Image (cartoon, grey):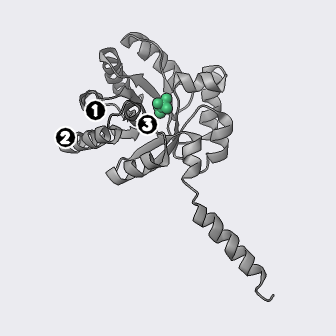
Amino acid sequence: MRIFLDTAMPEEIRELADLIDGVTTNPSLVAKAGRPLREAVEEICRLVSGPVSVEVTATDAAGMVEEARELAGIADNVVIKIPMGREGIRAVKALEAEGIRTNVTLVFSPVQALWAAKAGASYVSPFVGRIDDRAGDGMGLVSQILQIYDNFGFDTEVIVASVRHVRHVVEAALLGAPIVTAPYAVVSKLFDHPLTTEGIERFLADWKRVPK
Ligand code: G3P
């Protein structure tokens, strides 16, 4: 299972660059980072060799394709995030046909994910946290998408997104989702357990009592 960092903050990416498998951004995350998009993407792509998702803001297929071509020119590992919808699906078909990888984002239903796969998207991003925020079943959606992709042998990879906590990561792993993208605060917690910290402290204290 690959773990991506869901952020546009270079300081967060720098800290985990050697451990993570990729990065996902969106316009809100880029705004939070407070830098021009191109500058932020150039730096992120220098730090990370895995896929870096960058979202278009055009709302029509032609505009999305034009914007995507420009973003894809920044670095080889740029993946273009395309918002789900008719225009988005048209843009995905065009971009994948010319070898530009896409990640269909803002996916909240299994049939949206079916369209993404039919269009040949490299990735699809179901937003589990936003579904759970409304008392829905985010992981139920992930499970349905995985089943549908398996039924038809689609190559599109599921990126479990809008992750709120460690439990989302555990559930995604149990379902066999290939990728999860999580904010820095969640990814940081994946390394830790209070009993590990306590155990290390005890071993080190005992080690001091071993005759040298
Ligand atoms: O990158 C997209 C997604 O992960 C956004 O998450 O927390 O804004 O619902 P969130």
- The answer to which of marks 1 and 2 sits earlier in the sequence is 1
Expressed as whole percent of the image width and height from the top left, the position of residue 204 reads 72, 74
Residue at point 51% right, 46% down?
21
Tell me, yes or no, whether the two marked residues, 1 and 2, touch with CB atoms within 8 Å: yes
Ligand 1 closer than 8 Å to label 3 CB: yes
Answer left or right for 149 relative to 126. Answer: left
Q: Out of 166 and 97, give the one closest to the viewer.
A: 166
Q: Dot 3 corresponds to which residue?
A: 161
- Disc 3 and disc 1 in contact, CB within 8 angstroms: no
Q: Which residue is outermost to the left?
A: 151
Q: Nearer the viewer, residue 152 or 182?
A: 182
Judge the density around disc 2: few (<14), some (14-19), many (≥20) Cα neighbours within 10 Å: few
* Location of residue 198 (image quadrant): bottom right
Residue 131, image x, y percentages: 37, 32
Q: Disc 3 marks which amino acid?
A: Ala
Q: Which residue is mark 2?
A: 152
Circle nearer the N terminus (2, 3)? 2
How much space separates mark 3 and mark 1, taking CA atoms? 17 Å
- List the residue tagged with mark 1: 117
Vertical comparison of 45 with 165: above or below: above
Badge 3, how many Cα within 10 Å: few under 14, some, many 20+?
A: many
Q: Is residue 144 left or right of residue 197?
A: left
For marks 3 and 1 on the same chain, the one whose residue lies earlier in the sequence:
1
Q: CA distance from mark 1 to mark 2?
A: 10 Å
Residue 165 place in picture, x, y as percent: 49, 44
| Residue type (three-letter) at the residue carrying disc 1 | Ala
Q: Amino acid at mark 2?
A: Phe
